[in-house]
Image (cartoon, coloured by chain):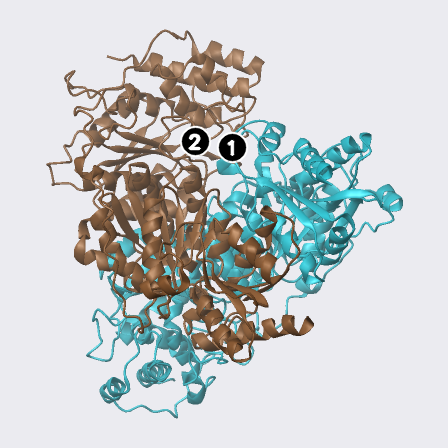
Chain colours: A cyan, B brown
């Protein structure tokens, strides 16, 4: 049996000394939850046999054991507590604790994947519960016994994303998910909206379909009982109660050190050396020799067989050459194939699956389709949770609405996620629905992220191939699809005629038209490829040759082909159905310089006027990104020669 | 007295014929709320004297009358209903109704500002209630009697932003805000999370501090009573009940036309001509000659005097020349001055005002400071509401957390808002707190928006000046501030020495170092300006001259100065403390070409490695965006000569 009081004291000690050594950090936010976390990690049910073990069951020597319980610190600023827990369990040395926040340390200011026990990086508040929903859904899907615990702060309960996750958890009956709410009353700059009124949080949680218990977060007996309540049920077999559970704990920020306890002005502030000395005296004798024991999961770490199976025998759709079909439809066509070949692929959609066409998998692989309703932030958070448990989540909605989850997407880059984002309804070419539904910023949004891949297919053939490329590539990939039906460009015959491969590699491009007398190169992607091809045909009639490049891989970009085009044709015209900044034009402008310094002229056609409702063709013309605008620009350049 | 039944029928008729004529749109989503809106617009309290008028009081001939009630269609896809309401009130002709969704029509697919009665464009769900909170707060602030009504759909209740707004409205005791929830059971692709279980919505709304009433949304008598309940109280003088109110109405999607009523598969689908004929028969006789009367507000449209006062007599802070101070601190210093000179400026902060330094105004202008807690989406939505009622909202939080509200920010561009976004804690130079807190994407995020202005000051002097420039500029402006103290660059002496003005105009730049023998131009902004200056000093010792440009206006960009630098120095090195794509490097790469085709070489130094925790200097060095990296790059280029 672990000595909880001594371990809690040790955890407080580490939280305090590490932050003082760092000269910054969040000791008081750590102290409020120290007792809660000490009991979670090191406590055992009162009538537990040794075999049953503690509340939190994890093999700390094998963090990837699929049977391990999961702990997410949604209040990531309490990272000193997070690291201290593992120090108390003998997994982090005191020496390492003192490296907190130093350059090169695994113990960063907020938890990151540098620290091996971090499930996902946190620090942007209100995201952890969604990740927990993802991990709990994963357990249900894989029929695994592990529980997911999420530590929430009270300030972050103002974030709507938390309530999206609350609704989602109850909708999916996630009785394997336990939230612990640390109501320490004080936010960064004073009292939270509800202070110590735990009854407000309880009423809200109940209304959102959760089971609740309210406790004194510093009473070890209370906490013990709460975790017994939250974990006693054998959720796998007992179906009487299928609700997620939340422990609402009234706590004091800075608990255990009188002069910072429940005091304003102590958020994100380390104690001075002198204050630390006083604090340590108050804590009383610390036994650094004790090592808390965390119970191992009952089951051996067998890896699920089915996840290992992976076939690349994808059957692509056979599209009639003369029948236009939208790239979003192609997504719907290939998705069941992908789920067939990749048993770890899952699909999430934000209540628009009949528009994104993710709905196809509902007929073929319903158990791996998750309806996330109109709650994009939670959808991406859930995807992060799935991804960290080895799944490949496909996340689809209108491109424009992915902007709703930009902060979660931003954090997913630090989580080294393997999410495939599919944004449909790109650009003004969606037509009548108007500006609110037009994806015009998402190329810029996804391009700016570290190591992101941005793909933008122009026809159904390339769409299917690129989606398969995306799933084979480890990492976050954004694929933009178009609402409108577009002509089929690629075919075996095309490959023969053009002498180019029908493979679509990430970082590549396709040169659709090319001659030795091209007066300019038009670089397009998605819908504008079709406008560029139409412009080519018209210009041909006037004996003007242009090169046309399908820049389906917007990031990484095909530097070499662009460099050659710049060198050979001297003029580049980019044309894109989105806003200019951060888009294709800017990507192309910077590209050739990466090879060498050549002189070329670049013109960018992009959406520059307030978008309107209307027919796709009218809007492409209005924004001057259609065939006529391309022809006009080519002639303008040509005449200047 | 208006004939509600006849008017509701007329509204249904217009909703149906306009969508059939358009061949697309959302008639069924319009029909479910037709009775609710008909009563709101044209109904009167049962005991009303003529003088008291109806529920909704607005002078439709003067939409800008500050006493007008406000109506926000958060479920923007019900735009046919929105437009039909005004048609029934005689403000839109049947001819105009038939232009719905056509290019050039004011009646766009989702409401936009083209239609004069649109408060804010909607269509990205879950945003309208936040806008309503902003408008209701504005009424309280200006002691105006108007009420704000928000029509919500049930599908959008899954969006967390709605719950942020719910919490915010109750926190601010907005008893002048009325939400109407149209529970029509069906979302886009089937049943919503809670179907017709109005009790779930009621429990949630109550838990979030709202007064509730549940009604049959097609029973005119019921609706009548609900609006009496919601509007009877004289909120200005009666303080017994200071809660916002929500009418939860059980409705049927497609109500009034049997073959689409409460039927799945009819979302966002217009009736065929043949179906329309059948529907019109079902509706019964339509009297197109009736014109519903909307009650005018009791008070005359006096414009608030205080809003007209505007002094530009801003007293800038006198910073000691040799004491570094952060640009975020400068924001805190100038803000009370701005509130003093601009009586229509308001300040919103997401519970980090002691870090952004927005807290200064709490001491000077508390009544215009709004604590939005950690709920960035609602903060921006509220700002949109304020902006549309003539205020200039300053919205501040960590730059990174503005990404949380990207969808709201995206919609604010279509609302022609006048919001000043201040994002602090830019870049890796924040140091120990690590990646989750680092603003690395926001330059790209704000740049890509239509007509946005992006400013990034490097010292406290330019920060104050640029913030004042921002407030004088009508439109959305993003100003990025830095956590770290930075040296004072600008002074009267500097102006004399450099022969440049101390004015900081939007679209300008400052050339800090320049000679006729510059081997390269370093273009920097914010923190990197200081690194560039340090690099300059070191290179001077080796007799290498570089030009240094402070690109404080990232958008619009100073094309001419950059063109000249490219022409004169042939080499440009951009250096920025953010991710590369969509950032300063790409902006600069595209700029000179706007003047003419010149040959120059561009190198970009930006954040390219996974950001870490550490000291600011360590992180700038690690990411190779510090003085050493600049010197290295200059020499690399120089040696190549």
The residue shown at (54%, 56%) is: A383
How crowded pointer 2 is (Cα within 10 Å; few <14, some 14-19, many 20+) is rated as: many
Spot occupied by residue B129 in the image (x, y as percentages of width and height): 34, 40
Regarding residue A560, the answer to whether it shows in the image is yes
Determine which quarter of the picture holds residue A606: top right
How crowded pointer 1 is (Cα within 10 Å; few <14, some 14-19, many 20+) is rated as: many
- The residue lying toward the viewer, choosing from A132 and B532, is B532
Chain designation of label 1: A
Regarding residue A152, the answer to whether it shows in the image is no
Q: Is residue B388 above or below residue A594?
A: above
Determine whether, in the image, residue B382 is placed left or right of residue A614.
left
Kind of element beneath mark 1? loop
Q: Is residue B384 above or below residue A310?
A: above
- The residue lying toward the viewer, choosing from A424 and A84, is A424
Spot occupied by residue B276 in the image (x, y as percentages of width and height): 53, 14
Spot occupied by residue A190 in the image (x, y as percentages of width and height): 23, 63
Q: Is residue B379 above or below residue B262?
A: below
Q: Distance between the residues labelled 2 and 1?
A: 9 Å
Chain designation of label 2: B
Determine whether, in the image, residue A261 is placed left or right of residue B498.
left
- The residue lying toward the viewer, choosing from A374 and A40, is A374
Residue A434, numbered label: 1
The mark total stands at 2
Which quadrant of the rendered structure holds the C terminus of chain A? top right
Which quadrant of the rendered structure holds the N terminus of chain A? bottom left
Residue where numbered disc 2 is placed: B112
Spot occupied by residue A318 in the image (x, y as percentages of width and height): 79, 40
Kind of element beneath mark 2? loop
Q: Are marks 2 and 1 in contact (CB under 8 Å)?
A: yes
Residue A337, numbered label: none
């Amino acid at each position: 049996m672990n000595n909880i009081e001594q371990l809690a004291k040790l955890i407080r000690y580490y939280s305090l000394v590490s932050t003082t050594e760092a000269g910054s950090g969040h000791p008081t936010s750590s102290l409020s939850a120290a007792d809660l976390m000490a009991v979670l990690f090191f406590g055992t049910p009162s009538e537990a046999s040794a075999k049953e073990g503690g509340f939190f069951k994890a093999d700390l020597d094998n963090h990837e054991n699929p049977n391990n319980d999961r702990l997410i610190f949604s209040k990531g600023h309490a990272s000193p507590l997070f690291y201290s827990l593992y120090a108390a369990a003998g997994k982090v040395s005191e020496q390492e604790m003192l490296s907190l926040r130093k350059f090169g340390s695994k113990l960063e200011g907020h938890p990151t994947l540098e620290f091996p026990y971090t499930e996902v990086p946190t620090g942007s508040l209100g995201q952890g519960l969604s990740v927990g929903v993802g991990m709990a859904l994963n357990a249900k899907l894989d029929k695994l016994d592990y529980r997911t615990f999420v530590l929430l702060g009270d300030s972050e309960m103002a974030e709507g994303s938390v309530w999206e996750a609350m609704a989602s958890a109850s909708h999916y009956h996630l009785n394997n998910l336990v939230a612990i709410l640390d109501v320490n009353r004080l936010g960064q700059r004073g009292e939270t909206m509800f202070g110590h009124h735990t009854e407000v949080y309880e009423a809200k949680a109940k209304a959102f379909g959760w089971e609740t218990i309210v406790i004194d977060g510093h009473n070890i007996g209370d906490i013990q009982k709460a975790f017994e309540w939250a974990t006693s049920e054998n959720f796998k077999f007992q179906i009487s109660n299928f609700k997620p559970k939340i422990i609402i704990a009234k706590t004091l920020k800075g608990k255990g050190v009188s002069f910072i306890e429940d005091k304003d002005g102590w958020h994100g502030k380390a104690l001075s050396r002198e204050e630390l000395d006083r604090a340590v005296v108050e804590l009383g004798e610390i036994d650094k020799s004790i090592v808390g024991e965390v119970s191992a999961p009952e089951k051996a770490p067998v890896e699920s067989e089915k996840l290992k199976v992976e076939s690349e025998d994808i059957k692509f759709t056979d599209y009639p050459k003369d029948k236009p079909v939208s790239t979003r439809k192609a997504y719907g066509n290939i998705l069941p194939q992908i789920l067939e070949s990749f048993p770890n692929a899952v699909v999430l959609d934000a209540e628009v699956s009949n528009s994104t066409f993710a709905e196809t998998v509902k007929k073929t692989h319903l158990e791996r389709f998750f309806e996330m309703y109109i709650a994009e932030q939670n959808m991406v958070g859930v995807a992060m949770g799935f991804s960290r448990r080895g799944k490949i989540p496909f996340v689809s909605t209108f491109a424009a609405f992915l902007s709703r989850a930009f902060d979660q997407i931003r954090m997913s880059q630090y989580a080294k996620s393997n999410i495939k984002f599919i944004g449909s309804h790109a650009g003004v070419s969606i037509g009548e629905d108007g500006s609110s539904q037009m994806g015009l910023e998402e190329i810029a949004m996804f391009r700016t992220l570290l190591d992101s891949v941005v793909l933008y297919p122009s026809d159904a053939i390339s769409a299917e191939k690129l989606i398969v490329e995306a799933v084979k590539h480890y990492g976050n990939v954004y694929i933009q699809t178009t609402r409108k039906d577009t002509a089929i460009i690629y075919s075996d015959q095309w490959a023969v005629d053009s002498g180019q491969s029908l493979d679509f590699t990430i970082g590549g491009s396709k040169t659709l038209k090319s001659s030795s007398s091209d007066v300019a190169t038009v670089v397009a992607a998605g819908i504008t490829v079709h406008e560029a091809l139409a412009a080519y045909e018209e210009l041909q009639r006037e004996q003007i040759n242009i090169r046309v490049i399908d820049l389906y891989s917007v990031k990484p970009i095909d530097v070499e082909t662009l460099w050659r085009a710049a060198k050979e044709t001297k003029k580049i015209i980019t044309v894109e159905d989105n806003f200019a900044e951060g888009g294709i034009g800017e990507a192309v402008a910077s590209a050739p310089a990466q090879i060498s310094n050549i002189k070329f002229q670049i013109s960018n056609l992009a959406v520059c006027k307030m978008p309107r409702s209307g027919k796709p063709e009218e809007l492409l013309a209005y924004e001057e990104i259609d065939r006529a605008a391309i022809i006009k620009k080519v002639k303008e350049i040509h005449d200047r020669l």
